[in-house]
DNA sequence: GATAAAAATGAACATACGTTTATTTCGGTC
DNA sequence: GACCGAAATAAACGTATGTTCATTTTTATC
């Protein structure tokens, strides 16, 4: 049931997974605690499903976003736009996907980390493409990818849709910084 | 008592503030639950003190790090080195300082956010200096500061002291990306 | 070695936890 | 309108929560 997933997301975000109570979640969706178990397996599976489905979604949308452009600079710009827009729209999932890795079963955590590595691999590959073509120059493509990912994901902590800057302005600023940060020194 | 603060840090990191138990904290330092109250005011104040003292420390060390160099490029490089080294050494505090803002009293949260703003202001000022001098070119110094801060702070989530790269290598890579990302187009 | 201050104890407070279970209610199909 | 599977209920399981308090133990000063 979608209402349970949504309320669960909000409650985990507000209290942390361990401290969030299934009784409060049930109350929030108009059920009693026991009745929840007609819709979820247990608390741990609820957390895992929330994060896992988010990972599947973001991976699928990433493929779409990267399929548009052939040039590494264009692909990187497409990626920056996609990552910012998607993460602005899914702040709770992103927060939980990082802070509650600790609460996952080792097996469940491994599943999520493998999917996250896939995401990082795709970004790293774009950078490596650019390096091979002489457009980018970085000492380590993977660390560069980590840096860019952290920088972009950081919008989740401060972006306000009704703030001084709208999403497009942020995208312009970040795209400029990322492309300049990766760029090879221009030939004279 | 330092042992309480250290164990509290580890327990909050492992379970989240709400779910961490004072009884377990007491057990960890060889006390009974009630005896804890000879050393701390209450659970909330323990959390606040942990974060607040971290903020004070990082602010003080930032001032030292920024006092060395006059040139904006040098100051930014100094900042990148400092921020990376300090955050690598204080991963638990950094994690809690972000993820457990939600668990602070509104008044306590405001205190922390004000200190964080001071930190951001200092970085923003360095960027603005560079922009004024024509060395840097960014559309918005504050957003650029947010981006750089998130990028650097991200090391906390993946850096492994015994991994493929040591801290100095990471510092070189990030310093290069940051300075290039901020740089004004070179004059012909 | 008495004394005073500081620290530790264990019990108590009312309340909450995730999950299971036997039982009742609900929705929709013949 | 009987029937059946799905969904909801209330109660129960043993255990845990932050904090207070009267009492006992430890520590250090003269």
Image (cartoon, coloured by chain):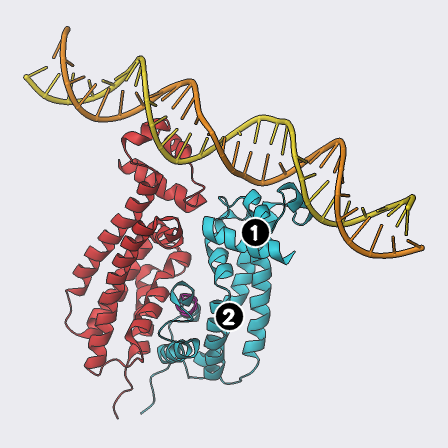
Chain colours: A cyan, B red, C orange, D yellow
Is B78 contained in the magenta span? no
Residue behind mark 2: A86
Foreground pick, A123 / B110: B110
Residue behind mark 1: A47
Where residue A124 appears, as percent x and y from the top left, is 48, 71
Compared to residue B138, the image places residue A58 above or below, namely: above
Q: Residue at x 27, y 33 (%)?
A: B39
- For the residue carrying disc 2, how many other residues have a C-alpha within 10 Å: few (<14), some (14-19), or many (20+)? some
Q: Residue at x 37, y 60 (%)?
A: B155
Asked whether residue A72 is in view, the answer is: yes
Asked whether residue A128 is in view, the answer is: no
Where residue B100 appears, as percent x and y from the top left, is 39, 50
- Of all chains, the one bearing label 1 is A
Where residue B118 appears, as percent x and y from the top left, is 24, 62
Q: What kind of element bears circle 2?
A: helix
Q: Earlier in the sequence, mark 2 or mark 1?
A: 1
Q: With A88 as the anchor, is A22 left or right in this view?
A: right
Foreground pick, A43 / A176: A43
Q: CA distance from mark 2 to mark 1?
A: 20 Å
């Amino acid at each position: 049931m979608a209402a349970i997933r949504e309320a669960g997301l909000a409650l985990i975000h507000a209290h942390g997974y361990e401290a969030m109570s299934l009784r409060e979640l049930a109350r929030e969706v108009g059920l009693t605690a026991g009745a929840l178990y007609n819709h979820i397996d247990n608390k741990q599976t609820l957390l895992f499903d929330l994060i896992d489905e988010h990972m599947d979604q973001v991976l699928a949308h990433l493929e779409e976003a990267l399929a548009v452009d052939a040039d590494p600079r264009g692909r990187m710009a497409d990626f920056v736009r996609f990552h910012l827009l998607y993460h602005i729209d899914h702040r709770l999932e992103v927060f939980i996907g990082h802070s509650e890795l600790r609460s996952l079963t080792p097996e469940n955590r491994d599943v999520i980390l493998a999917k996250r590595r896939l995401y990082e691999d795709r970004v790293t590959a774009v950078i490596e493409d650019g390096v091979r073509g002489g457009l980018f120059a970085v000492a380590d493509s993977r660390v560069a990818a980590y840096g860019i990912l952290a920088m972009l994901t950081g919008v989740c902590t401060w972006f306000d849709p009704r703030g001084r800057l709208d999403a497009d302005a942020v995208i312009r600023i970040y795209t400029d910084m990322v492309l300049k940060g990766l760029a090879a020194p221009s030939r004279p």
